[in-house]
Amino acid sequence: PSRVMVLPATPSRDAGAHSRPSQDGQGEAGPPRPRRPPAFYSSVFAQIEEVGWGQLVSATGDDGVSCLTFRVMDEQRRHHLLEITLPMNYPACPPSIAADVPYLPKLQWSESSRLKDVLCQFQEVLQDYWSTMDGIDKALWVVDPTKPTYAMSHHRIALGDDCYILLHVDTHKPNSLPE
């Protein structure tokens, strides 16, 4: 089964849901959510412009830009989706990321880091892994999973005569000898 892993950036993410008034005005309202300064939006829009609006798949969240999903294309022109969640104190604190991969890289972050840096780090760290897994899928008779995703670091390979081997690729060192 495919897994989506999430790497939390900071403990400053929402600690829980607040009560919200119902549609008819009834119900209790919780404390008001903190608002981001206008400079935050200008900065995020400029950073999306650097990456390219064509790479942005979706922008969601309470403020419309707190959760951004980008399409990342690797050197072999494979497409991957990277979800970036911006904490309230962004860019002082790093964003959290989620993707359909077996592990997420630890982001190198400073207050001057930008969204394009996140996308580049994600792509650089996982490039060898993606290439290794594609090579296995193309060169060997993979019987399980029948529809592999990049979140799966193991494959069952048919050797012939009802003989199989379970191949596990080290996600951190994909070019090393697999288990």
Image (tube, rainbow, N blue to C red):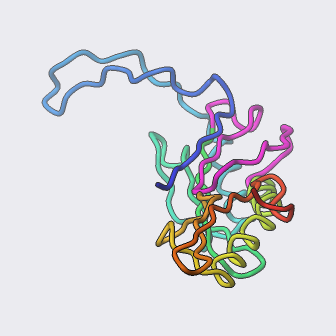
Q: Residue at x 46, y 54 (%)?
A: 1
Residue 16 in the image, given as x and y percentages of width and height: 44, 21
Residue nearest the viewer, comparing 51 with 152: 152
State the residue at coordinates (39%, 24%).
17
110 lies left or right of 144: right
Q: Is residue 94 a member of the stretch shown in magenta?
A: yes
**Which residue range is magenta in the image?**
87-115
Callout count: 0
Main secondary structure type of the part rendered in magenta = loop
Tell which of 96 and 36 is nearer to you.
96
In the rendered image, the quadrant that contains the C terminus is bottom right
Identify the residue at image location x=58%, y=81%: 160
Q: Where is residue 124 shown, x and y percent of the image?
A: 83, 62
Can you tell which quarter of the image residue 45 is in? bottom right
Q: Is residue 145 left or right of residue 11?
A: left
Closer to us: 136 or 80:
136
Instruction: Give the residue displayed 63% in from the left and 34% down from the top.
Output: 87
Within the image, what quadrant is residue 22 found in?
top left
